[in-house]
Amino acid sequence: MKSSRSDAEPRPQDRPESTIDQPPGIFSRGFRYVRGFHRDLFGKLPGAAGLPFRRRLAFRAALIRRKYGWKIVVAGVAYYIIRDVAIYILLPYLVARKVIGG
């Protein structure tokens, strides 16, 4: 008698032990989150087809603010802290130590 499983799909006992019932890792969850954000940022807006550009922009900003909230603020602050440390602290230090530019 045939089982309802596809022959292409391995049975749980045939799969390596490392792939059985493990949650996705932090990197795959992060990439999935970024892909979803990119889709929300640049994808089609439901219900905004006939709106002028500025209304669509405001509609998209409200959608992103509702969906991601404080995480967007944290990501922006982290980006600017890393950038400013590299530009205003690390780069002058390396120039003073004559590692670069000298």
Image (cartoon, helix red, strand yellow):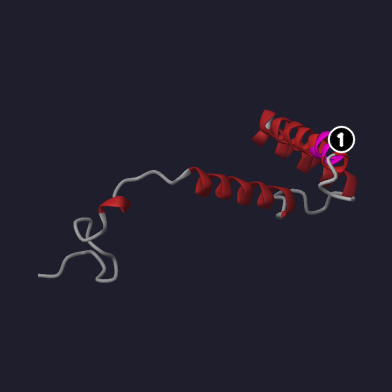
Q: Left or right: where does residue 95 sit relative to residue 61?
A: right
**Callout count:** 1
Against 14, residue 70 (above or below) is above
Could you tell me which secondary element the residue under label 1 belongs to? helix
**Identity of the amino acid at label 1?**
Tyr
Q: Residue at x 73, y 31 (%)?
A: 73
Residue 74 vs residue 8, the one in the foreground? 74
Q: Is residue 52 visible?
A: no
- Magenta stretch, main secondary structure, is helix
Mark 1 lies on residue: 88
Query: What residue occupies the far left of the structure in this picture?
Result: 1
Q: Quadrant of residue 91?
A: top right
Q: Residue at x 75, y 38 (%)?
A: 79
Residue 49 vs residue 65, the one in the foreground? 65
Q: Left or right: where does residue 72 sit relative to residue 12?
A: right
Q: Is residue 96 visible?
A: yes
Magenta stretch encompasses residue 89: yes
Q: Residue at x 68, y 28 (%)?
A: 70
Please provide the residue range marked out in magenta.
86-93
Q: Where residue 20 sits: x, y (%)?
A: 29, 50
Against 11, residue 69 (above or below) is above
Against 13, residue 24 (above or below) is above
Magenta stretch encompasses residue 29: no
Q: Residue at x 87, y 43 (%)?
A: 95
Residue 55 vs residue 73, the one in the foreground? 73
Q: Where residue 56 sits: x, y (%)?
A: 82, 46
Image quarter hosting the N terminus: bottom left
Q: Where residue 80 sits: x, y (%)?
A: 80, 35
Classify mark 1: residues with Cα within 10 Å, few (<14), some (14-19) or many (20+).
few
